[in-house]
Amino acid sequence: MSQDVLARKYRPSKFAEVVGQNHVLQSIKTILEKNISHQAYIFSGTRGVGKTTLARLIAKSLHCQELNDSFEACGKCDACKSMHNNSHIEFIEVDAASNTQVDKIRELLESSMYKPSSSKYKIYLIDEVHMLSKGSFNALLKTLEEPPEHIVFLMATTEIEKVPKTILSRCLQFHLRTVSGDELVKHLEKVLKAEKIKFDTPAVEQISIAANGSVRDALTLADQCIAFCDGKLSGDQINDLLGTIDESNIFELLENVFMGNGEAAYNSLTRLFEDQVDYENILQAILRLLHKIILQKELSNSDNSQVATLANNIQKDVGQLFYEITLDGLSKFSIHPNPRQAVEFAVMRMLAFSSLNKNGEIETEKKNFDGLAIKETTIDNNPKYSSADEKKQPQKEKINHLITRDEWNKTYFELELSGIIQQMFASFELKSFCKNSIVFIKDANVEAPTKNIQSKFIEVIQKKFAISPVLFFEDGQPDFSPQEWKNENLRIQQNKNLSDFKKTKIISEYLDAFSATVDINSISKK
């Protein structure tokens, strides 16, 4: 086995070997194909995705003496060999992190005025360009404004926002994406097979997850894992080394949560804690598995039988509710005083809503982090009660006439509506109210309520008025909704309170003596 580390040994020497950056490669190929000369290129993206590598490959292609039809450097000519050995005199690589002073950049730029002796271009690669000082950027800008034809600048940065816009506007910008998990897994498998290292799929997947989209990190972790596992990579050993979580334990935890078995879920969580894994990693692992389950529920795209089984045993909206609960727990993890309690509380919150998943009767229509969930109830549009049934029903207000808009506004807030439903319908203006239908006017920019919310609203109307109407919503400009009626009455009451307040003798004297005014919102009915 080679003594070179994998990240160096498998660093791409051709454009075709670059992983996960097809959108950038296509642009570069077009530039080389049409022989378009640009004075500056800048590559941005997170660490280990190929910024510096792509810059060197462009330089290699520009220097190559026998560029082939695919616009890959031949790798055989003197220029390619000297580029490979980092000895090409017309390729200068600068580390901006250790050369921030303006004098060094000026010295570099002064030498750029001389034409190359052995190549068409003199190429400068400035790595971590965002580390340059303000004076250095100003010196570089002067050259970029009127560059000699023989100069090409290649720049790489992990923090593109720190590069002045005056510099960016004179460069071709290429943003490199993080590499997907599937692409990392394929690349790792290819490398491990070339190195004749035995491995199992869970081990490679764990490394790709820990790499978080970075090819270099994935290869560095693979090197570490090879040393730890003595040449054979297994999922269990990788979990121990990286502090990652065995996904089977997360499957067990969520299965118990879905069934509403609190004791079993807590026992599963305790076993995870005993493995001494990072608490934050537990929440991240739950999120990853919930993501797979939700996708399987919608798209049936998983080959994992356990994912398919869990997807069949959870309602769509409940799965999304659990995802948001976990995500909320993760977003507040850094400020929680006790990391273990943060994980436990997220699981307990999911268990609190596990009853929504029973018998397929309930779907969550509205979810938030305060635990709001609306239960969907099937409404019989034509209820018929026997005399015995009617005796069991609560007393209802019988109506034999149409309710006017003013009557509706006065009685609206007396209806037993839950907070979110009351708030939503309060903004709609009543157009007509009869036994079989209710028509509302809503703002054109506001979505009509979902079927779940409409069902809950009809249920309240049914109990109050003994009718089962169908709801209709027309786009328009609501002029006098229940909320506006309430606000108007509040203004009237406040004005009356203000008038009464000013009539008080001592208040009247103070107002006259100091030419004072009264804040109307500070006066209560008392």
Image: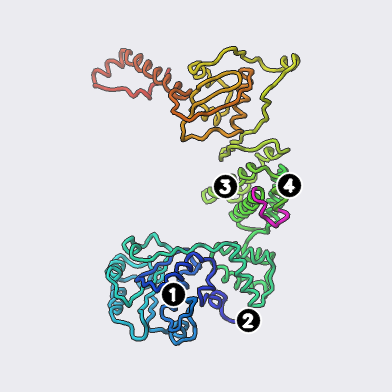
Q: Which residue is at the front of the view, 140 or 29?
A: 29
Q: Give the amino acid type for the residue marked by disc 1 in the picture.
A: Ile
Front label number (1 vs 4):
1
As measured in the structure, the alpha-carbon distance from the residue carrying label 2 to the one carrying label 4 is 47 Å
Q: Which residue is mark 3?
A: 329
**Residues shaded magenta:** 298-306
Q: CB atoms at circles 3 and 1 under 8 Å apart?
A: no
Between discs 1 and 4, the one toward the N terminus: 1
Q: Which residue is mark 4?
A: 264
Q: Is 468 above or below relative to 354?
A: above
Question: Is residue 348 something that shows in the picture?
Answer: no
Please rate how many residues cluster around mark 2, counting C-alpha atoms within 10 Å: few if below 14, some from 14 to 19, many from 20: few
As measured in the structure, the alpha-carbon distance from the residue carrying label 3 to the one carrying label 1 is 45 Å
As measured in the structure, the alpha-carbon distance from the residue carrying label 2 to the one carrying label 3 is 45 Å
Please rate how many residues cluster around mark 4, counting C-alpha atoms within 10 Å: few if below 14, some from 14 to 19, many from 20: some
Q: Which residue is mark 1?
A: 58
Q: Position of residue 449 (x, y in %)?
A: 55, 33
